[in-house]
Amino acid sequence: MADKIELTINGQLVTADKGMTILEAALSKGMYIPHLCHHRELEPVGACRLCLVEIDGKWKKTVISCKTEAKEGMVVQTETPEISEIRQATVELLIADHDVDCLACGQNTRCALQRVADHVGLNKKRLQRLKPPEKKLPIDDSNPFFNFDPNQCVLCGICVRTCDELQNVQAIDYAYRGLGTKIAGFGDKLRIESSCESCGECIVRCPVGALTEKDSPKPTHQVKTVCSFCGCGCGLLLGVRDNRIVSAQGNVNSPANKGRLCVKGRFGYKFVNHPDRLTSPLIKRNGEFVKADWDEALDLVTDTFSKNKGEKFAAIASAKATNEDNYILQKFTRAVMGTNNIDHCARL
Amino acid sequence: MIFSEIKKRAEAEWDQLQHSKELTLFIGAATCGRSAGALEAKKTFQDEFEKRGIRANIIEVGCLGPCWAEPLISIVKPGGPNIFYKNVTTERATELVEKFIVAGDPLPEYALGLVGDKGDYSIPVLWDMPNFKSQERVLFRNFGFIDPTNINHYIANDGYSGLNKALSMKPAELIEEIKTSGLRGRGGGGFSVGRKWEAGLAAKEKQKYVVCNADEGDPGAFMDRSVLEGEPHSVLEGMIIAGYTIGAQTGYIYVRAEYPLAVKRLQGAIQQAKDMGFLGENIMGSGFSFEILIFQGAGAFVCGESTALTLSIEGKRGMPKAAPRPRTTEVGLFDKPTLLNNVKTFSYIPQIINKGGAWLSGIGTKDSKGTAVFALTGMVNNCGLIEVPMGTTIREIIYDIGGGITDDKAFKAVQTGGPSGGCLPEEFLDTPVDYDSLTAAGSMMGSGGMVIMDETTCMVEVARYFLDFTQKESCGQCTLCKLGTKQMLNILEDIVAGKGRPEDIDTLFNIGKAVNTGSLCGLGQSAANPVLTTIKYFREEYEAHINDKICPAMQCKELLSYVINADTCIGCTACAKACPVEAITGEKKQVHVIDQAKCIRCGMCLEKCPKKIRAVECVPGRLNEGGK
Amino acid sequence: MAGLAASLGSGAMTNAISELGSASAILAIGTNTTATHPIVALQVKDAVRNGSKLIVANPKEIELCRFADVFLQHKPGTDVPLLMGMMRVIVEEGLHDKSFIESRCEDFNASEKSLAEFDLNTVEKITGVPQDKIIQAARIYATETPASIIYCMGITQHVQGTDNVLAISNLALLTGNIGKPSSGVNPLRGQNNVQGACDMGCLPNVYPGYQAVTSPEAKAKFESAWGVALSDTAGLTHTKIFDACYEGTIKALYLVGENPVLSEADASHAIEAMKKVDFLVVQDIFMTETAELADVVLPAVTFAEKDGTFTNTERRVQRVRKAIASVGDAKSDWWITCQLAKRLKGKGFDFSSSAEIMEEISTLTPSYKGITYTRLEKGSLQWPCPSEDHSGTPFLHAEKFGTDSGKGKFKPLTYRKSAEVTDSEYPILLTTDRSLYHYHSTMTRRVYGLNVLNNEELMNIHPEDASVLGIEDGQMVKVVSRRGEVEVKALVTENCPQGTVSMTFHFFETPTNVLTCCELDPVANTPTTKVCAVRIEGLNS
């Protein structure tokens, strides 16, 4: 068990693990402090300036709670008039700069900016005085799996840190300065021309609608399973809607991948519902495949196999199939066909 | 070679120059002098000397300070004083050769002043003149006198004596000496240098760095550049002493690539220091080794911030790290303990070690020791680089050193501390310049810019100008700085264009306060200062713009009109011909009229109207299209 | 696999993937980890971020080199001399773990003697790696503990594959870098369930759980469990099966979920074999290039349409769950095979669920004995899991090795040249490689976006070679080997060393494997797809 400390947040006694930040301590107890650039898996940078809190007593100071360690006996206020004013100005600045088209946005109802605005409240008159950006920036839809809309971006930098700290790919960073600052790949070329590996980890973490997956209807439910590409064996949550796979998410509880996925794991499921799937047995007659029903096909196969038992038969198993599939195939080869001529592509 | 030998040789060389049997010329050839034409003047002298068979030592030196007198060249005849000549154009150079060097007339009308034995010369002693008298040249003592590319000139003037002495002292003793001096960081923060070095020494890691911040980015500021160009060795010596004190092996100088001459001077100085054994392995037999590398910054203002600067050296994007974070002396460059100081701070160190901390603490005020260096610019007669004891009042600087306001106009405001400093009105003229007084007044010391504004300056426009700079230079990561400065700028642009709304002052104030309180780094936390101080001290100017649609300083084009006085106009058509948009009509010898709808308020008509007629007038407010 | 089984007693990864993140040093040899095992690569990169040292040994300058402290760019097929060179440095500098060798290993002396042939001058000459780099790598691996080795097909797909693996296990045993957390020998298994397919006995010489078919006890055990008499001779390996089809001794071939037309080395030979065999049944999810050759094609379901288990590269058995109903009339592989078995009067194929099959697996497979679906609902388990109260085994060989004696076996090795050598007609070596964006081809080539990201084969060639051959970036070239030829676009890149070109094999349009060599490693019968002599001819565009 981690060492515990106690602090007071908005008059409530809060127990937290030693080493937690004030923000983590509050969030762990379900107390909301507005934030955009914080992510539990990433190093805090304190860029959004929303999580300001006031510490009373001997540490008296206004600090950002995402980078300040919670200490025993600390007394924290999260909503003083001064902080509320700064926060309101911050949110209004963000909203004025944001392409507010929430109903059409992929992050609607899950958007961190919506939550912050809802919590902080806006001064509508002042908001109207602020000017929208002079021009809309083009959406980068060059990647086949996701879009980047800089007009929705709040520059929290979570995508940059994800790409660096978690993936070590460093495909994107801040570019330009001042109001022109944006997240971009090297040389501000299109994403498809950057060193992006399309793992999609940034999309998962984007708190707003700046990075969104293409063609991604919301699933009605998710099924916990395992990725079928390489030997890593990443835990997957497949999203299902109308008997089709519509999304894939890393399973954070899987020890193999702890929620992280590569491009194949996240987007490669799309072969499952491909129109070319084989949907019925086929028998070749006069050089052409003809659809057959299962009985017909199985009878034809068993008829031939029965004449070729022993060393005239061989089976090649699949390293893609399940253990159960493979167990049955080798049992079939050995116990029914009477031969050890079974192998698979382990060597390839 | 032991140091006393080195020094003896250097002194011999220096002495020889001082007692040269030949004519000696010192060309003020820092970047400022060069852009004023110093090298052209130098060429003229060389050509003339060749033509006339005159032998002379011609030495390029750093900047003496008075920009208004550039190109500045001093001439020493054998046995004579060092006479400084101002504004030496090529014509003047030729004249000086003919009349002074050859014929013996010292041309006092071209002289700024002289240093040395006055003799019979009717030229004032430089240091007795009003704009030098109030100065105290500590950092500048050698500027304009020694050749920055000759290490022996520096050594002969006590250079590297500080290092020689330091190497025989213990780090703790050195820190004690610096603490005694009371020196505070000259980058703007004003943190105690002794305490910072102490923290650097206390850091437990083996690998440590010393970093010199030469990323001088404030518009109009060039103090650091002058130090690097005028006496680069003083910075190197300060850094080597710092490295020895805290136990660092490597030093970096982060200098803007826009300072090519400074970079060249530094490169040369580093090589010479290596050759002399002041840099490299086992420095002067002490067992201490130190190297200095130059890193050229790409011109981002924010990289002057310490954490952004170290990231930039690491090859990353320079963006400040948010507090709370470990101090740079604990986790700095490459995550190692790093002692980061400004150019000027390092430059003080050799003299402090040489003369003892008590010497510097004898200069200045109780809490701000030593001298303050300013780039004095704006509406003042004598612009330039000045060095005064801390505690000198703003009034003394403007009226004694600066020679008063240009054209005898009225003083309106002074802005210190760079683009994020504050604008102080007349009632603060007697504020002493030191860290705490300026901060208390709502401005700051910063790295040393001082802009003087007169009655023709529009304070709303000033705020707009500085906001435009800071918003462009925001690193972009922190919401308040990036977006807040831009929205404030939008509102200020509206106000100067006559589109301000009554509630705008409050909105500016609220956003400005949020930006200053909530931003991530020092740049953001002071970005709103020009707005907040001008609202505080010049609120009536904002109100005039917003409510009366008038710019009292008559600067905002959208808030003034040009009219032709029917009583005085003689119909000369000069204005109509000059008007680029054909807004002026009228027959020859008839009264002309300006069509206010067409007028773009460029002011050409006013300029072209004959001075003795003065029929075109500029009036406050925007006349409507009817003309009245 | 055969190599590790002989020296350590198990051919699987000795450690868990997550342990790599805590290793102090990692040697990645013959693995382009970021492309083939991206999530394992994340652990390697995390380790480097946390201060670990990384040694990359690879003929190509792969992405992982960006993070490496030492990059050993050895010539293809020279892994044994490289590793033996490192060992020689370790022994000469006394950095080996003498007490570990004494207490946990055997046959060290013979192995030590075999180092004599590998003085660094010789090693440098053979491998092309400067001596100081070999010394640096050896010191890092021997002194930064715990150290892990990861390797992949770059080690095994060689004529010397087994020797390569033995050299790796020698190196680990020499420094005691095995049998501890974050410390071991880790073959990264390619396919999602290649480990499981091996565990399940889809190998010609062993029953499930690596019980030899030639062992009378094992045979008796399975005969009694399955109620039939079983063959006691080992069957044919994958490559030999195709030879037998080609020669006509095998008449009926049942191919489940494989596409040898693209994936088999010397693919032309495999295609001929499949054309010759009397009766070919292919069971797959798409009409693959191989299925086109079949007499009967049986439609199988994908992983998303079935229940079961996969065993990943770290021996982790995990539940696969049915997410959607079968597409069309496709069926689970096990269901189809059971139908065939029942029609052929096979006993013991009356399963109604994959869970029932797992019950039978666990009774017959000691390492899976404690694994049940009920337990897997709560979380995955790493074998060996010998009983229901055993929590699984994250790392192997903690107390003793799986060999008969319980000791780690050193093996003496000598350098054997690749069977495929270059000559004046075929002067360049071709090595095969993989793309991050594809896994073989059947599935990923049918994902639109993955084909946008990587839509064609590109032959990587060093600028010097390209210039000598007059080949420009993006130009079409013909690659000819002793077995076949393909046309492909050239990518001029310094990632590829001089004298070597590389290609992937994901594209049916460019069937790289018609070029590769089917020469087998004598022990493991793994084909030599990593080395193949070719010549390159520029084509006019």
Image: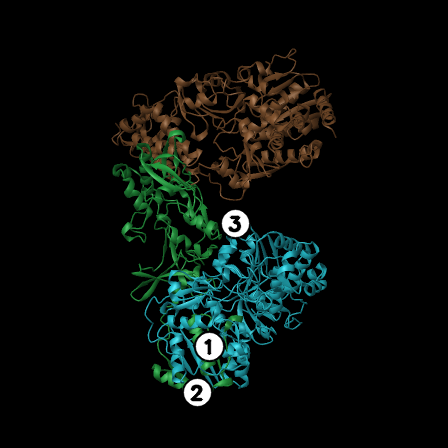
The crowd level at tag 1 (other Cα within 10 Å; few <14, some 14-19, many 20+) is many
- The disc numbered 3 marks a residue on which chain? C
Which residue is identified by label 2?
A306
Q: Chain C rendered in what hue?
A: cyan
Q: Helix, strand, or loop for circle 1? A: helix
In the image, residue C172 sits, relative to residue B89, either above or below, namely below
Q: Amino acid at mark 2?
A: Ser
Please name the residue shown 33% across and 41% down the image: A33
Which residue is identified by label 3?
C49
Q: Chain B rendered in what hue?
A: brown
Whichever of labels 1 and 2 marks the residue nearer the N terminus, that label is: 2
Residue under disc 1 on the same chain as residue under disc 2? yes
Which residue is identified by label 1?
A330
The quarter of the displayed image where residue C119 is located: bottom right
Please name the residue shown 46% across and 68% down the image: C368
Q: Which chain is green?
A: A
Q: Amino acid at mark 1?
A: Gln
Please name the residue shown 40% across and 75% down the image: C334
